[in-house]
Structure formats: structure tokens, C-alpha cells
Image: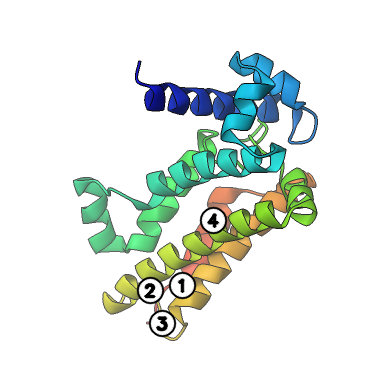
Amino acid sequence: MPRDETKQKTREALIRAALELFTEQGLDAPSLDAICDRAGFTRGAFYVHFADREALLVAVMEHVGEAFLASVFAGLSAEDHRSARKHGAIRTVAGRFLRAVEAGAYPLLAAEGGRPTVRMHQLLAACARSPTVRERYKGLVEASIASIAALASDDQDARVVRGDVLRDEIGTLLLAVIIGAQTMRELDVPIDPTRLTKAMLTLLDPPE
């Protein structure tokens, strides 16, 4: 196997092992030795790819977060395009998001009766400790806001979303609701993502 491919596979194995252990034990509990053992590599191999534990956490965030955002925002199918034209792109993406939550595929909000891949309070604690982790999480949030804002602009042009609210504010509002819902679920506050999403989308309906 070519050396570059071998290095990439090693890096992916370490990320995958870290994600598995973070899901099982939380962000703080797994040691580097445990992660390396799960991946089948030594600490020496770890430090070839990551400067420290924070760099590994950022890599895990990118692996999970970017893949999830791509699944929600990119490559709309023909059926979704038809739905977007009729109901609006934001509603199409909201449907995708809800299906991901119901399937347990959204890393920060567990399906009913399940547990999230990453616990929100531990992620925020990691952000408080590490400017690098905080900036990466902030970047994922800002990328989501920008994507929703672009959809809002299209929907406003199509007059399926109210036009008297700035598109960036729509993006920020929807992300604030999602992050707030994650926190409320951790506090065991009863919350129904489907009903909450429906209420938010109703507020975005253009006035008759």
C-alpha cells in the first residue's frame, strides 16, 4: 500500500476509534492510550497525525460535522427539488434534519430514548478549555447559518418564506433553536423536535 494511503488509513482509524469511545464514554473519559489501543496503533503513530488530544477532537468534529452538514444541505434529489419548489428549500432541509434526528444520525441530539453521539455540555466544556475547539465548533455553526441564509434568500424570492426578516437572521434564529433544543433535551425538558420545527416554520410563513 502506498505510504500516503497508509497514513490516511491510520488517521481515519484513530478518528473512528476516538468517535466510538467518545460515544461510549463521553468526550473527557477516554485516554489517548485507550484511543490508540482501540485503533490498533501506538502513541507514536498518534503523534504523526495529531499534535495533541485537542487536535484529535477537532478532527472528529470535522469528520462528523461536515459529513452531517453535507447530508442535510448538499445533493438534493429530484424529489427534493420538486418539494423545494412547492414548499420551499428551508422546509425541505428541515425535513431532512428531522429524519436524521429520528434515526439518531444527528450527533448532538439523540433520538427519543437514545443518547447523542456527543453530549452538549461536554462539547461546551471543551470549547471553554480550548480556543481551537471553540473556533472549529463556531465555524460549523456559522457554516450552517450561512447555508440556511442562502436557502432563505431563495425561498423569499419564491415568496414561500416571509420577506420582512433578514435572511441571516433566519439562519441565526434556526440555529439558536436547534442549539437550545439540544440543551433542553440534556436537561430532560420535554421537547418534541417535530412540533418545534413545525412551529418555527409556521412563523416563517409569508403573511396572507
Label 3 to label 1: alpha-carbon separation: 9 Å
Quadrant including the N terminus: top left
Residue at 63 percent across and 59 percent down: it is 135
Question: Label 4, on which residue?
Answer: 140
Q: Of the numbered discs in the image, which one, if any, rests on residue 204? A: 1
Determine the secondary structure under disc 1. Answer: loop
Residue 6 position, x and y percent, is 43, 21
Label 2 to label 1: alpha-carbon separation: 6 Å
Determine the secondary structure under disc 2. Answer: loop
Callout in the foreground (2, 4): 4
Residues at discs 2 and 3 in contact (Cβ within 8 Å): no
Amino acid at circle 1: Leu
Residue 44 position, x and y percent, is 65, 23
Question: Label 3, on which residue?
Answer: 207
Q: Nearer the viewer, residue 31 or 183?
A: 31
Q: Is residue 190 visible?
A: no
Amino acid at circle 4: Leu
Residue 56 position, x and y percent, is 63, 37
Residues at discs 3 and 1 in contact (Cβ within 8 Å): no
Amino acid at circle 2: Val
Label 2 to label 4: alpha-carbon separation: 24 Å
Label 1 to label 4: alpha-carbon separation: 24 Å
Q: Of the numbered discs in the image, which one, if any, rests on residue 30? A: none
Sort mark 3 into few (<14), some (14-19) or many (20+) by Cα contacts within 10 Å. Answer: few
Residue at 67 percent across and 15 percent down: it is 37
Residues at discs 3 and 4 in contact (Cβ within 8 Å): no
